[in-house]
Image (tube, helix red, strand yellow):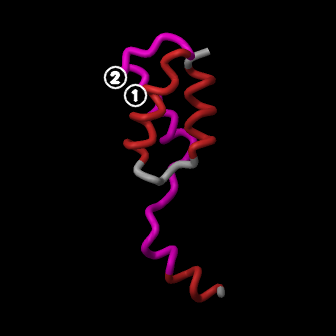
Amino acid sequence: ERAELAVLQEFLPAPLGEAEAEEIVRACIAEAGATSRKDTGAVMKLATARAGGRADGRLLSGLVARLLA
């Protein structure tokens, strides 16, 4: 199982760190012109696409919520 995991990890994209994810979310907030939590959906759509599967949705939504608070 460890050998299989090592092989799979070679092909998976490296996950984003929290700082990188925050940069993406901040850029998406600016791009969407978001000013409050009611804009969360638009920001999440952009951030999820830009993260390209390299960030957990919970991490992104937590950052969006914190930055739009």
Mark 2 element type: helix
Q: Amino acid at mark 2?
A: Glu
Crowdedness near tag 2: few (<14), some (14–19) or many (≥20) residues, C-alpha within 10 Å: few
User: Quarter holding the C terminus?
Assistant: top right
Q: Tag 1: residue type?
A: Cys
The residue tagged 2 is 31
The image shows residue 61 at horizontal and vertical percentages of: 58, 34
Q: For mark 1, what is the residue?
A: 28
How many neighbours does mark 1 have within 10 angstroms: few (below 14), some (14-19), or many (20 or more)? many
Q: What percent of the width, then of the height, locates residue 24?
A: 43, 35
Principal secondary structure, stretch drawn in magenta? helix
The quarter holding residue 37 reads: top right
Pick the residue in front: 64 or 20. Answer: 64
Q: Is residue 24 magenta?
A: yes
Q: Are marks 2 and 1 in contact (CB under 8 Å)?
A: yes
Q: Foreground: 48 or 27? A: 48
The boundaries of the magenta stretch are 8-37
